[in-house]
Image (tube, rainbow, N blue to C red):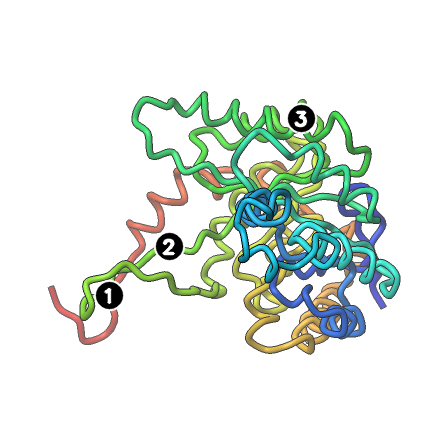
C-alpha cells in the first residue's frame, strides 16, 4: 500500500486530504465523522471580523452602560451571560482539540489592519495548531493601486506574525497581477504556506424582483484547472506549503493537484454535497491509482508534473492557450 503521508504548514499528516472551511466545524460530531472518514486535518469555519466588531458594538451599547437606557436595561442579559462570537469560536477550538487526534487550523476572515494580533493570539492560546488568514480586500476605489493592495495584505500578515508562533497560511485569490512575485513576498513576511484559491460568492440580480441577491454557488470539478496551473508554476519556486482548494470532488481531481505540486488538497463543496464518505472514496481512488502506476508514496508523486519537471514547460504557459484555441473543433451537427 502506498504511503500517503505529507506535510502541511510543517505539520506531519497521514494523507493529503484536509476539509477546508465550512459550517460543518460548528458541530463537533460532524468534525469527528470527517476524521473517521480519513480527514488528515481540519480547517475550521472562519471567524469574521465583522462579527467580532458587531459584538463589540453591541456590548458597548447594551452591556457596558445599560443604565443609560432606563427601564429597558432591566430586560438586558448580564455581561457574564453573553457569549460573543469570539468566545464561541475559542470554545469550539478547545472542544474540538479535546476530541480530535488530527491537527486543527483556525481561520480568520477580515480586511482591516486592527485587531488581528489579539484574535490570532487568542486562537493560538485556545489550542489551534495553525492559522489560515482568509483576507479579502475589495479593490473598488480607482485611486488605490495594486501595489497598495498587496502592501495591505502583507502588513496584515506581518502584524499577525508578531505575536503568534504557530504557522500561518494565507488564502489567496487569483486576482494578483503577478502571483509568483506576491507569493515570494508572503514567504518573506513570515507565512508558512498559501492556499490557492479563495472562492468568493458573487452577488446576482433577480430579474423578477429586480433585487441583488446572494446565492451559494458550490464548486465543480472544472474549477480545479485554474488552481492546478498555478500550483504547477509555483512548485519548486517557493518553500511555502502549497494547498490546493476549489473544485476537488473526485480522486482524479485530487491526483491532478498532487501531480502539479500541491502538498495538501482542500475539500469543501464535495463534503457538503455528499457527506464525509466522499473523503474515504477519494482516498481509496488515490491509493488504487498509485498502486496501478507503482508509486510508493505521495512524496514521490508530488510535483512530478509541475512546470519545472515537465519536458515541455510551456504546457502551463501562454503556448497552451494558443494550442487549445487552434485545436478546437465544433460538436457534431453544429455548422457555422
Residue 257: where, in percent of width, then height?
61, 54
Horizontally, is 214 left or right of 40 in the view? left
Label 2 environment density (alpha carbons within 10 Å; few <14, some 14–19, many ≥20): few
Label 3 environment density (alpha carbons within 10 Å; few <14, some 14–19, many ≥20): some
Q: Residue at x 55, y 66 (%)?
A: 269
Sooner in the amino-acid sequence: mark 2 or mark 3: 3
Q: Which residue is mark 3?
A: 159
Q: In the rendered image, is residue 231 in sight?
A: no
Nearest to viewer (mark 2 / mark 1): 1
Q: Residue at x 72, y 73 (%)?
A: 30
Nearest to viewer (mark 2 / mark 3): 3
Residue 221: where, in percent of width, then height?
49, 64
Label 1 environment density (alpha carbons within 10 Å; few <14, some 14–19, many ≥20): few
Classify the position of the C terminus by image quarter.
bottom left
Q: Secondary structure at mark 3?
A: helix
Classify the position of the N terminus by image quarter.
bottom right
Q: Which residue is mark 1?
A: 206
Measured Cα–Cα span from mark 2 to mark 3: 29 Å
Amino acid at each position: 500500500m502506498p504511503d500517503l503521508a505529507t506535510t502541511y504548514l510543517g505539520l506531519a499528516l497521514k494523507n493529503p486530504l484536509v476539509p477546508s472551511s465550512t459550517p460543518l466545524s460548528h458541530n463537533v460530531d460532524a468534525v469527528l465523522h470527517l476524521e473517521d472518514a480519513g480527514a488528515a486535518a481540519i480547517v475550521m469555519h472562519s471567524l469574521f471580523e465583522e462579527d467580532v466588531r458587531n459584538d463589540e458594538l453591541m456590548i458597548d451599547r447594551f452591556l457596558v452602560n445599560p443604565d443609560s437606557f432606563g427601564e429597558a436595561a432591566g430586560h438586558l442579559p448580564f455581561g457574564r451571560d453573553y457569549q460573543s462570537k469570539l468566545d464561541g469560536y475559542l470554545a469550539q477550538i478547545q472542544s474540538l482539540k479535546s476530541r480530535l487526534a488530527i491537527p486543527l487550523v483556525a481561520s480568520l476572515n477580515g480586511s482591516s489592519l486592527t485587531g488581528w494580533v489579539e484574535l490570532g493570539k487568542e486562537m493560538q492560546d485556545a489550542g489551534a495548531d495553525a492559522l489560515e488568514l482568509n483576507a479579502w480586500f475589495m479593490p473598488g476605489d480607482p485611486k488605490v493601486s495594486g501595489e497598495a493592495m498587496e502592501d495591505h495584505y502583507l502588513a496584515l500578515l506581518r502584524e499577525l506574525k508578531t505575536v503568534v508562533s504557530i504557522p500561518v497560511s494565507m488564502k489567496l485569490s487569483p486576482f494578483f497581477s503577478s502571483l509568483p512575485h506576491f507569493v515570494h513576498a508572503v514567504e518573506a513576511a513570515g507565512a508558512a504556506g498559501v492556499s490557492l484559491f479563495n472562492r468568493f460568492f458573487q452577488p446576482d440580480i433577480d430579474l423578477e424582483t429586480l433585487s441583488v441577491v446572494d446565492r451559494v454557488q458550490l464548486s465543480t470539478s472544472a474549477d480545479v484547472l485554474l488552481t492546478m496551473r498555478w500550483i504547477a508554476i509555483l512548485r519548486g519556486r517557493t518553500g511555502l506549503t502549497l494547498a490546493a482548494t476549489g473544485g476537488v470532488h473526485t480522486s482524479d481531481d485530487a491526483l491532478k493537484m498532487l501531480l502539479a505540486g500541491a502538498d495538501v488538497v482542500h475539500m469543501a463543496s464535495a463534503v457538503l454535497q455528499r457527506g464525509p464518505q466522499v473523503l474515504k472514496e477519494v482516498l481509496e481512488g488515490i491509493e488504487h491509482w498509485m498502486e496501478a502506476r507503482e508509486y510508493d508514496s505521495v512524496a514521490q508523486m508530488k510535483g512530478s508534473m509541475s512546470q519545472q519537471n515537465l519536458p515541455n514547460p510551456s504546457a502551463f504557459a501562454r503556448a497552451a492557450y494558443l494550442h487549445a484555441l487552434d485545436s478546437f473543433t465544433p460538436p457534431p451537427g453544429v455548422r457555422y
